[in-house]
């Protein structure tokens, strides 16, 4: 819808404003040493972290990673490589990065026979104020037969960063029931409680469980239940009273309902809300990226569950990237469509070139009970290669009853006869405000940002976005492999 902008005729035919924002760049510049990386952002201990990560094929380590750290005023503190070379005694399987109250941690797991027994372990590696990795702390372990039958781990933290939950999926047992261990820690890795639990379902070699914890220490597990010759089922298990009480609530949304992608948030009361896209009447794994609509789950702190869905979405390759709450008790779902195609590199075994393209992305408003109220669509026709589609993202945030979105698009020039003279020669950044009726109120073009008068156009990375302090938006901007933090006042 908005990917063809009239760059030379703003005053005549465009709603684009050139003066509604200011851009402030933060020195010094950093270099992205992990080329083609994907970006993730975290906030912990008053600081802001940007993780660069790229999967490695046929290498001693699974990922190349770099961690950039900014202080409370978004000034750069440090930039550090992670796991470039494994140190002796390192765990070897990254389970993720998680924000605690005063620090960011990385969790890694390993299968080991060094103790004389075959065991699976999970460790926490804290980072200091400059982003340097510190010594590991053992969180949990259990006996395992082999590296290929060693169970699995799930980790998550509470919104306030005071709780850390570790979920152990114990190894598969033929003709047995699925077993797990749930352990809750405080932000200093002190154990609060531990629960051994047996699910009322047969043991599976690859069970699918997602674990969450609220500020009060209530643990929730969203479970996908494999059913022979039928569509998979879903349940939510809630662990309360120090793990002593466990409540299962089945998700009933008609036969064939299957969750595709989702995000979660907690209410101030500690209730877990999960929303995203679902599909119907398909075999598991087929056309998962083409949802039928949106769904909403609301789970209270004592395990009561309500579920609803809305059937209005049929865009291919749409995945949820953000879930926001609104001041009227509703929700905003940001769904993005990015298509990926890989081709083998000539003469390079196990190496590929990756091409990315966008399609229709959605900003969806749902009411407090999950009914869709409007669906704002962005039709962007961007293409890139070997960069993890890092410029394609949308960053959204709410302000009162409005939704603001920041995204990258394609610039098209016209001559004074309104004939195309240039197609997609460079990318630009746009800032739109969507009103409570689901219609665009305004659109702002972020003018070409320059640093110190030097040549070079910087493109923002929306996936690194963060709203903070007095209507300021913070995110990284990039020119090739050069990165710089920047704030946009709006």
Image (cartoon, rainbow, N blue to C red):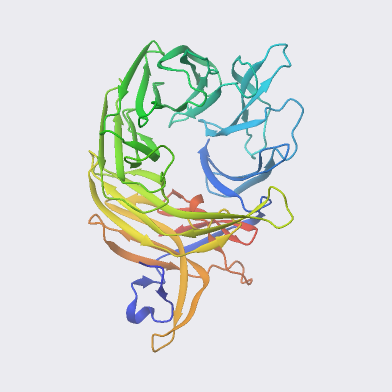
The C terminus - image quarter = bottom left
- Which x, y percent locates residue 375? 28, 54
Residue 388, image x, y percentages: 57, 53
Where is residue 174 drawn, in percent x and y?
51, 15
Number of numbered labels in the structure image = 0
When the figure is inspected, residue 209 is found, relative to residue 293, above or below; the finding is above
> Which of the image's four quarters has the N terminus?
bottom left
191, above or below 91, in the image? above
Furthest residue toward front: 229
Closest to the observer: 266 or 160?
266
Report whether residue 473 is seen: yes
User: Who is closer to the viewer here, 21 or 255?
Assistant: 255
Residue shown at the point (68%, 56%) measured from the top left: 345
Task: Tell which of 439 and 328 is nearer to you.
Answer: 439
At horizontal 46% and vertical 79% (from top left) the residue drawn is 413
Residue 176 left/right relative to 38: left
Quarter where residue 307 is shown: top left
Residue found 48% across the figure and 51% down from its top: 465
Q: Residue 147 occupies which quadrant of the picture?
A: top right
- Horizontal side, residue 200 vs residue 387: left or right: left
Instruction: Kindly tell me whether residue 301 is visible in this rendering.
Output: no
């Amino acid at each position: 819808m908005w990917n063809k902008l009239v760059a030379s005729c703003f005053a005549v035919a465009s709603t684009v404003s050139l003066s509604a924002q200011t851009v402030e760049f933060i020195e010094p510049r950093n270099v992205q040493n992990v080329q083609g990386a994907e970006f993730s952002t975290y906030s912990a201990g008053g600081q802001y972290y940007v993780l660069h990560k790229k999967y490695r094929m046929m290498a001693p380590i699974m990922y190349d990673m770099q961690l950039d750290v900014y202080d409370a005023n978004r000034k750069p503190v440090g930039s550090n490589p992670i796991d470039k070379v494994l140190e002796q005694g390192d765990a070897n399987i990254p389970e993720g990065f998680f924000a605690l109250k005063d620090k960011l941690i990385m969790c890694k797991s390993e299968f080991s026979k060094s103790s004389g027994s075959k065991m699976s372990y999970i460790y926490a590696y804290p980072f200091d104020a400059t982003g340097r990795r510190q010594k590991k702390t053992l969180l949990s372990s259990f006996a395992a037969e082999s590296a290929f039958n060693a169970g699995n781990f799930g980790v998550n933290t509470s919104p306030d960063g005071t709780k850390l939950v570790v979920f152990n999926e114990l190894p598969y047992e033929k003709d047995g029931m699925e077993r797990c261990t749930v352990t809750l820690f405080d932000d200093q890795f002190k154990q609060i409680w531990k629960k051994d639990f047996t699910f009322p379902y047969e043991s599976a070699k690859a069970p699918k469980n997602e674990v969450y914890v609220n500020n009060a220490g209530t643990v929730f597990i969203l479970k996908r239940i494999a059913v022979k010759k039928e569509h998979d089922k879903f349940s939510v298990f809630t662990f309360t009273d120090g793990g002593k009480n466990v409540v299962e609530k089945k998700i009933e949304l008609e036969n064939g309902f299957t969750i595709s992608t989702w995000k979660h948030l907690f209410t101030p009361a500690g209730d877990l809300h999960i929303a995203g896209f679902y599909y119907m009447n398909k075999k598991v794994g087929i056309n998962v990226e083409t949802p039928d609509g949106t769904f909403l789950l609301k789970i209270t702190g004592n395990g009561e569950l309500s579920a609803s869905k809305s059937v209005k979405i049929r865009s291919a390759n749409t995945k949820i990237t953000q879930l926001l709450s609104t001041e009227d008790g509703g929700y905003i779902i940001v769904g993005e469509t990015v298509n990926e195609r890989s081709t083998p590199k000539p003469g390079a075994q196990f190496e590929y070139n990756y091409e990315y393209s966008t399609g229709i992305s959605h900003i969806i408003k749902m009411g407090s009970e999950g009914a869709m109220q409007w669906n704002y669509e962005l039709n962007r026709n961007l293409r890139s290669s070997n960069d993890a589609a890092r410029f394609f993202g949308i960053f959204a945030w709410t302000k009162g009853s409005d939704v603001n979105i920041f995204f990258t698009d394609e610039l098209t020039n016209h001559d004074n006869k309104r004939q195309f003279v240039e197609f997609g020669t460079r990318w630009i950044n746009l800032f739109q405000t969507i009103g409570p009726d689901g219609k665009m109120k305004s659109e702002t073009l972020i003018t070409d940002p320059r640093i110190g008068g030097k040549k070079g156009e910087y493109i923002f990375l929306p996936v690194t976005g963060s709203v903070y302090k007095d209507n300021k938006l913070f995110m990284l901007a990039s020119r090739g492999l050069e990165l710089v933090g920047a704030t946009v006042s709006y």
